[in-house]
Structures are given as structure tokens and as C-alpha cells.
Amino acid sequence: MQALARFTSSIVARNPIAEIQCRGYMTDWRMLRDYKRRQCVAKHYFERNQLNTLRKNTILPRVLQEAAHEELKKLPRDSATVRIHQRCCVTSYPRNVSIRYRLARHAWRHLADYNKLSGIQKALW
């Protein structure tokens, strides 16, 4: 019994989240990929935005525009905002996702039916 307690306390010491019973919050590998892309975009957004502005500015000399383009090509592909795809944060479903709630229509309807979304009421007329 003491060995089990020692083992459990060592896990909690290494990982404080292990104290809470928590299965992974990623539904599938697509959701994990999208999460990593969002982190990459957040990390490189400012630099990418500046380089794009320099590249598209027609007042600057062509040499500077090309240099900005070369620097932009060195950034990771996943740092582009275009590569982020809206996915449902519950089911990882890619279609018909409400941007405000980040939920697909199925998950939104299910949560709304059981009063899990605050401020949402079923329409009555």
C-alpha cells in the first residue's frame, strides 16, 4: 500500500494535472494538429504580419520586397492563419461550426437542449 501511495505522489509531483482525473481533451489527431497550428500562428503572427506588409508595399524598393519574401519563406508553414480550420471543440467535426461558440451544430443543439449553454432559449412562437 505504501509503494502505491509513493508511486501516486511521485506522479502528482511530476504532473500536477494528474491529480484531477482527466482523460485527454483532444478528441482525435486532427484536433491536436489544429491546436498545434493555432499555437504556431500565435507565436509567429507579429513577425509574419510585418513581413507580409513589407512584401506587399509597392513604395519600397524591389530588393527590400524580395528580402522580406525570402524571410517569409523561412517561417514555418503552419504559422499562416490560412492553415487554421474551424473545428468543433467537443467532437472535432469540421463542418458547420459556429465561430462564436466553436461548436458544430450537432454539439450545439445537444448542449442547448439540456440547458448547458447559458443564455440560450428554444424559440417559441
Image: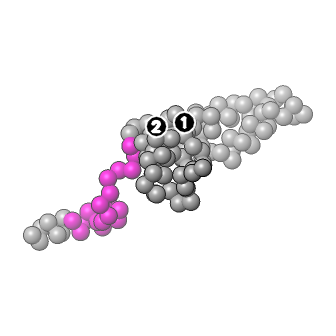
Residue at 63% of width from left, 38% of height from top?
A: 81
Residue designated by label 2: 93
Amino acid type, mark 2: Tyr
Q: Which residue ends up furthest to the left in the rendered image?
A: 1
Q: Which region of the structure is painted magenta?
A: 8-27
Q: Which residue ends up furthest to the right in the rendered image?
A: 59
Q: Which residue ends up furthest to the front in the rendered image?
A: 125
Residue at 45% of width from left, 45% of height from top?
A: 107
Q: Position of residue 92 (x, y in %)?
A: 44, 40
Crowding near pointer 1: few (<14 within 10 Å), some, many (20+)?
A: some
Residue at 58% of width from left, 34% of height from top?
A: 83
Amino acid type, mark 1: Asn
> Could you say which quadrant of the image residue 68 lies in?
top right
Q: In the shown orientation, is residue 44 left or right of residue 31? A: right
Residue designated by label 1: 96
Q: Which residue ends up furthest to the bottom in the rendered image?
A: 2
Residue 79 to residue 6: above or below: above
Residue at 59% of width from left, 45% of height from top?
A: 99
Crowding near pointer 2: few (<14 within 10 Å), some, many (20+)?
A: some
Q: Position of residue 39 (x, y in %)?
A: 54, 47
- Camera-nearest label, 1 or 2: 1
Q: Which label is found at residue 14?
A: none
Q: How many marks?
A: 2
As measured in the structure, the alpha-carbon distance from the residue carrying label 1 to the one carrying label 2 is 8 Å
